[in-house]
């Protein structure tokens, strides 16, 4: 789970952390987690400053977290990774990518969602060893533009359930990520699960992902769904700092979809994973491909 | 914190700091230095071990998270009587040069063959993604895994991309 669990911007010095630290010093200090002094089951602790929720830890342990003094282990909740009923599917924050990719629904109608979920899981930059540990909640809370769970949840009209001090609330997943590394979490708040309504789980889905290398970080990710009554949702992530959701009461033409995209005046990311102009062009192209597949 | 971890079928109980990573617990507290500490950011894969029979990067797992769990490391691959076929394969096909990435490669390869006894070259390459090797260019590592698969299936003969007698360390060099 994201360190601190707040709407902070996370440092991106992953490369510096990988190659820049002093192994002589690190050998004595046990490297990056040199401020952590306590580890507690999340079920038995009350949040305080310096705490971080611990899910898979793949981000938390990958670079220095100087403000973290205590880790609250979410495994203590022992949540079932994925549960389903006729109303929809609930994915626990602690569900790993491997668990979600392996999941097969009991309700046959949810099969399209399961297929899209598996594709999104494989869109995570990381080998299967990372997929065995990285969690759905962690991916949402890290709130990177390329977070594939953000794309999945937004496309499926998912709702994230948040638990704070004495209160719980839900909010649309599409609104949860507010920017590159930013989200709507309040200090001490915990994302407990992602809820996906049945109405969207049986929709036809399509998915396109583009990156500069075969298994690289997503530079453009477009996912779409078309409901039984032809309502169409297209979500753009990875090329934009936060999800851009386009909704249409009937299947749009590519030109209509691109016009709707432009009307939202999205900002395109410009970094080593792709420049802004290329991302903008590819976003338009992939929207067309997704719509064509949904119509086929 | 006091933890008990079953490593290669032996129980170890130690007092550890909450921040201690599993890789350091294995290397520094248990003296099992076969697993290597590389990038410390879950990128290089030198530290891959199995946690409850599932490959993970032990630089992204705390030792306290392994409390009560089972861990398998590269030291547990061989028996006193023989090397694991994966280890044999790395020796036979020269699947290593400096050897730094080798323990993680082997633990990943062992898991792959346990779950997919007859992998394609593409499947091998996908499995070892997330394992960085700066020496071999991966070619001999892929050949090693395929060789091990054939050895375990009872097959013999050429591995794809390897001509008979080519590339097998020591092959064709009879003792004088």
Image (cartoon, rainbow, N blue to C red):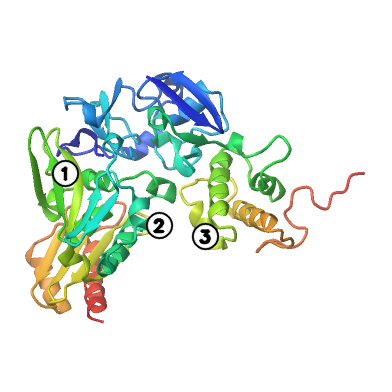
Above/below status of A30 relative to A243: above
| Residue assigned mark 1 | A182
> In the rendered structure, the residue with mark 1 lies on which chain?
A
From the viewer's perspective, is A174 left or right of A112? Answer: left
> In the rendered structure, the residue with mark 3 lies on which chain?
B
How far apart are labels 1 and 2 at the CA level? 25 Å
Quarter of the figure with the C terminus of chain A: bottom left
> In the rendered structure, the residue with mark 2 lies on which chain?
A
Above/below status of B134 relative to A76: below
Q: Residues within 10 Å of mark 1 (few under 14, many from 20)?
A: many
How far apart are labels 1 and 3 at the CA level? 36 Å
Quarter of the figure with residue A230: bottom left
From the viewer's perspective, is A276 left or right of B69? Answer: left
Q: Residues within 10 Å of mark 3 (few under 14, many from 20)?
A: some
Q: Nearer the viewer, residue A260 or A153?
A: A153
Q: Give the mark toward the camera: 1 or 3.
A: 3
Question: Residue B123, which numbered label?
Answer: 3
Above/below status of A17 relative to B87: above
Residue under the image location 22 percent in, 80 percent down? A295
Q: Secondary structure at mark 1?
A: strand
Q: Nearer the viewer, residue A261 or A134?
A: A134
Q: Secondary structure at mark 2?
A: loop
Question: Residue A260: x, y in percent?
Answer: 9, 69
| Residue assigned mark 2 | A215
Question: Residue A256: x, y in percent?
Answer: 11, 76
């Amino acid at each position: 789970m994201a360190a601190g669990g707040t709407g902070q911007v996370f440092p991106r010095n992953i490369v510096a952390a990988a190659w820049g630290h002093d192994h002589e010093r690190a050998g004595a200090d046990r490297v990056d987690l040199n401020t952590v002094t306590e580890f507690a089951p999340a079920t038995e602790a009350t949040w305080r400053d310096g705490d971080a929720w611990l899910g898979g830890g793949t981000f938390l342990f990958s670079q220095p977290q100087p403000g973290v003094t205590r880790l609250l282990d979410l495994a203590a909740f022992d949540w079932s990774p994925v549960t389903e009923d006729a109303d929809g599917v609930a994915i626990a924050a602690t569900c790993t990518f491997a668990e979600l990719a392996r999941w097969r629904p009991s309700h046959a109608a949810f099969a399209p969602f399961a297929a899209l979920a598996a594709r999104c899981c494989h869109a995570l930059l990381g080998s299967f060893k990372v997929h065995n540990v990285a969690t759905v909640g962690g991916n949402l809370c890290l709130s990177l533009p390329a977070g594939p769970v953000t794309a999945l949840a937004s496309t499926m009209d998912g709702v994230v359930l948040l638990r704070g001090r004495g209160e719980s609330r839900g909010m649309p997943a599409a609104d949860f990520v507010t920017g590159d590394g930013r989200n709507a979490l309040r200090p001490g708040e915990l994302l407990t699960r992602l809820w996906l309504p049945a109405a969207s789980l049986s929709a036809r889905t399509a998915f396109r992902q583009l990156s500069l290398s075969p298994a690289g970080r997503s530079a453009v990710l477009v996912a779409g769904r078309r409901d039984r009554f032809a309502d169409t949702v297209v979500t753009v992530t990875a090329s934009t700092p936060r999800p851009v959701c386009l909704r249409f009461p009937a299947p749009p033409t590519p030109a209509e979809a691109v016009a709707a995209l432009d009307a939202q005046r999205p900002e395109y990311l410009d970094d080593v994973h792709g420049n802004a102009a290329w991302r903008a062009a590819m976003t338009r192209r992939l929207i067309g491909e997704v719509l064509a597949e949904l119509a086929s | 914190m006091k933890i008990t971890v079953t490593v290669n079928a032996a129980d170890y109980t130690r007092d550890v700091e909450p921040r201690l990573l599993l890789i350091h617990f294995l290397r520094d507290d248990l003296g099992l230095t076969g697993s290597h500490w590389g990038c410390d950011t879950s990128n290089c894969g030198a530290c891959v071990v199995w946690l409850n029979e599932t490959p993970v990067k032990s630089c992204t797992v705390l030792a306290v998270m392994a409390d009560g769990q089972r861990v398998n490391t590269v030291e547990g691959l061989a028996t006193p009587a023989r090397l694991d076929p994966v280890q044999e394969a790395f020796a036979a096909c020269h699947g290593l040069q400096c050897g730094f990435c080798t323990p993680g490669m082997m633990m990943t390869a062992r898991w792959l063959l346990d779950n997919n006894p007859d992998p394609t070259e593409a499947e091998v390459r996908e499995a070892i993604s997330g394992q960085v090797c700066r020496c071999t260019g991966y070619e001999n590592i892929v050949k090693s895994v395929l060789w091990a698969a054939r050895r375990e299936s009872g097959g013999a003969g050429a591995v794809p991309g390897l001509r008979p007698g080519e590339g097998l360390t020591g092959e064709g060099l009879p003792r004088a």
